[in-house]
Image: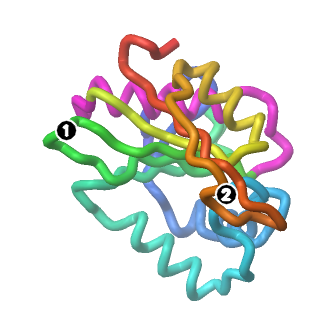
Amino acid sequence: MVHGILGERVRLVPFDTDRHFENAYQWINDPEVTEWVLVGDFPMSKLAEQAWFESMSAFREDNVSFAVETLDGIHIGFSGIHNIDWRQGTAITGTIIGDKTVWGQGFGSDAARTRAKYAFQTLGLRMLYSSVLQGNERSLRMQLRVGYRQTGCQPAKYWKRGAYRDEVLTALHPDWLT
């Protein structure tokens, strides 16, 4: 087992096809899991999901992707640092907890906090940005709990399941991390 980056409740580890792919495929096709993310409104074939999985698994200087596992090694989601701008010291972050049995138990907050510490302390970034679709109160609460601050809103930016949704913008500076 890869040791990964340890949080209080989770471990962030590299993608592993044998350990993580089937869950990724199941979760991307679960309407409840994808209710508040920009993907998931079209059926995803195994071939298409495999292409995404492989692209996230490949080394890229502007992207770090993790599988989220409990400390017991149970795969529960994914988390990433995307569009890293090394010159500006910024990146866009995101987490999805696909295992619905652990929703609301603090695993997403710990994954986001652990990812942020890695971004600031290991990668040397100075600011992380994220966002949620209007109505995704669970994700917004998680971000605020970690230390992200709401910085703005782009009205009616995305069509998602019957309505145009605002994109609520957030940011995290190392000094704000809880």
The residue at 39%/34% (across/down) is 128
Mark 2 — residue?
37
The reply to whether the magenta stretch includes residue 39 is: no
The residue at 61%/33% (across/down) is 71
Dividing the picture into quadrants, the one containing residue 56 is bottom left
Disc 2, disc 1: CB below 8 Å?
no
Label 2, label 1: how many angstroms apart (C-alpha)? 26 Å
The residue at 52%/24% (across/down) is 148
The residue at 34%/43% (across/down) is 91
Asked if 1 appears above or below 170 in the picture, the reply is: below
Is residue 6 shown to the viewer in this render? no
x, y percent for residue 137: 77, 35
x, y percent for residue 22: 67, 70
Mark 1 — residue?
88
Q: Nearer the viewer, residue 4 or 124?
A: 124
Q: Is residue 17 left or right of residue 5?
A: right
Q: Amino acid at mark 1?
A: Gln
- Within 10 Å of the Cα at label 1, are there few (<14), some (14-19), or many (20+) other Cα atoms? few
Asked if 31 appears above or below 107 in the picture, the reply is: below
Q: Nearer the viewer, residue 67 or 108?
A: 108
Q: Is residue 157 left or right of residue 41?
A: left
Magenta portion: prevailing SS class = helix
Is residue 62 shown to the viewer in this render? yes
- Within 10 Å of the Cα at label 2, are there few (<14), some (14-19), or many (20+) other Cα atoms? some
Asked if 85 appears above or below 42 in the picture, the reply is: above
Q: Residue furthest front?
A: 155
x, y percent for residue 55: 40, 72
Dividing the picture into quadrants, the one containing residue 23 is bottom right
**Range of residues picked out in magenta:** 99-125
Q: Secondary structure at mark 2?
A: loop
Q: Nearer the viewer, residue 3 or 157?
A: 157
